[in-house]
């Protein structure tokens, strides 16, 4: 049974930091890519950061460049999103997606991030 579980969300003041984690288990094939997405109320789900499994190359949405960092611990099958200098507009539910080499996507249930004073 495949499980993708995000954690680390919460309430933080503007300018603060959070680190999200995404732990995957039960995925049969090697991971091709990993990504963090976010969805604010009434908005579409947008890609925030991504990383390829083989090369480790990363890509970021313009709105988070220089503030967010995606990383991984392959031994733990875990992907992280370090979020610094958080802004109120970063408030959203954050989702992790892992794609295997067959092209199947595995999503987590999401974790709420609220940036507010």
Image (cartoon, helix red, strand yellow):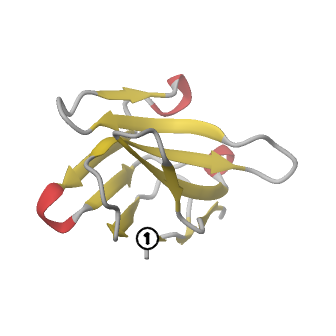
Residue at point 56%, 63% (across, down): 13
Q: How many marks?
A: 1
Name the image quarter holding the C terminus: bottom right
- Residue 103 left/right relative to 94: left
- Does any portion of residue 87 appear in the rendered image? no
- Quarter residue 73 falls in: bottom left
User: Regarding mark 1 in the picture, which secondary structure is present there?
Assistant: loop
User: Where does the image place residue 21, in percent across and percent down from the top left?
Assistant: 37, 65
Closer to the camera in the image, 30 or 37: 30
- Number of residues whose C-alpha sits closer than 10 Å to that of mark 1, classed few (under 14), some (14–19) or many (20 or more): few
As drawn, which residue projects farthest toward the top?
62
Task: Please state the horizontal and vertical placement of residue 56, each as a whole percent of the image.
Answer: 20, 34
Q: Which residue is mark 1?
A: 2
Which image quarter: residue 4?
bottom left
- From this viewpoint, which residue is outermost toward the right? 42
Residue 35 in the image: state x and y as whole percent: 44, 43
Q: Residue at x 32, y 44 (%)?
A: 70
Taking the image as drawn, is residue 61 in sight? yes
33 vs 45, nearest the viewer? 33
Asked if 18 appears above or below 72 in the picture, the reply is below
- State the residue lying farthest toward the left: 75
Q: Is residue 100 above or below residue 113?
A: above
Q: Position of residue 14 (x, y in %)?
A: 56, 54
Nearer to me, 65 or 95: 95
34 left or right of 78?
right
Q: Residue at x 75, y 50 (%)?
A: 40
Q: Which residue: 67% across, 55% down?
A: 92
Quadrant holding the N terminus: bottom left
Camera-nearest residue between 21 and 62: 21
């Amino acid at each position: 049974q495949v499980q993708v579980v995000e954690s680390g969300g919460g309430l933080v003041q503007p300018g603060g930091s959070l680190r999200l984690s995404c732990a995957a288990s039960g995925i049969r094939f090697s991971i091709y890519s990993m990504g963090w997405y976010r969805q604010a109320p009434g908005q579409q789900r947008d890609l925030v950061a991504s990383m390829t499994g083989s090369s480790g190359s990363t890509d970021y949405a313009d709105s988070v460049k220089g503030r967010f960092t995606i990383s991984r611990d392959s031994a733990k099958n875990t992907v992280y999103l370090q979020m610094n200098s958080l802004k109120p507009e970063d408030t959203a539910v954050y989702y992790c997606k892992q794609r295997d080499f067959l092209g199947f996507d595995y999503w987590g249930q999401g974790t709420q991030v609220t940036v507010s004073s």
